[in-house]
Image: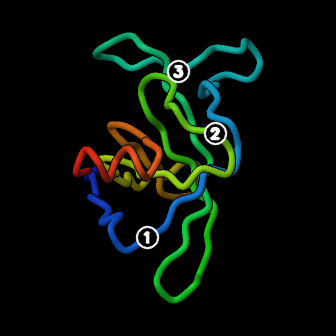
Amino acid sequence: MRNIPIPVDVARLQFICVKAPCPRVINKDTGEIKTDKTSGQTVYEVLCSVEDASGKIELVKVGVVGEPPVSPGDQVTPVGLIGYVWELSGRWGIAYRASAVLPAAVAEVRGA
């Protein structure tokens, strides 16, 4: 399966951080933490509730390089959000990655 990035239009969605950002663990047995291949920085996961215009809510983990300045309960904006479809042993899903996850008020000021 080709890994084609799918841009996500976040303008029509509301994101709320529901858990403090934490480093993404890639091996639970060894405790190995995922790092970005380019910068070497730690990749963090931000667990968000995402609500669309019809009121449907989903939980989504968003990966981001570096620790984002958000806390549980904050309305946030994932900047440059991209989805990647994955498949492993007959299971599949969508992994999300953003260039930044910012408090919504900060993102609005920056024009993100």
Please give the residue where the numbered disc 1 appears in the rendered image: 13
Secondary structure type for disc 2: loop
Outermost residue toward the bottom in this view: 54
On the picture, is 32 further left or further right than 53?
right
Can you tell which mark lies on residue 34? 3
Amino acid type for the residue under numbered disc 1: Leu
User: In the rendering, at what x and y percent does residue 105 appear?
Assistant: 41, 50
Which circle, 2 or 1, is nearer the viewer?
Answer: 2
User: In the rendering, at what x and y percent does residue 77 appear?
Assistant: 42, 52
Secondary structure type for disc 3: loop
Tell me the residue at 30%/66% (across/down): 9
Q: Which is nearer the N-term, disc 1 or disc 3?
A: 1
On the picture, is 31 further left or further right than 42?
right
Distance between the alpha carbons at the discs numbered 2 and 3:
21 Å
Instruction: Establish if 92 lies above or below 22.
Output: below
Q: What colouring method underlies this structural image?
A: rainbow
Please identify the quarter of the rendering in which residue 30 is found.
top right
Tell me the residue at 54%/55% (across/down): 75
User: In the rendering, at what x and y percent does residue 50 appear?
Assistant: 55, 66
Labels 2 & 1 near each other (Cβ < 8 A): no
Labels 2 & 3 near each other (Cβ < 8 A): no
Is residue 45 or residue 109 the one in the foreground?
109
Is residue 8 or residue 29 the one in the foreground?
8
On the picture, is 11 further left or further right than 96?
left
Amino acid type for the residue under numbered disc 2: Ser
Please give the residue where the numbered disc 2 appears in the rendered image: 71
Amino acid type for the residue under numbered disc 3: Lys
Q: Which is nearer the N-term, disc 2 or disc 1?
A: 1
Tell me the residue at 43%/41% (across/down): 101
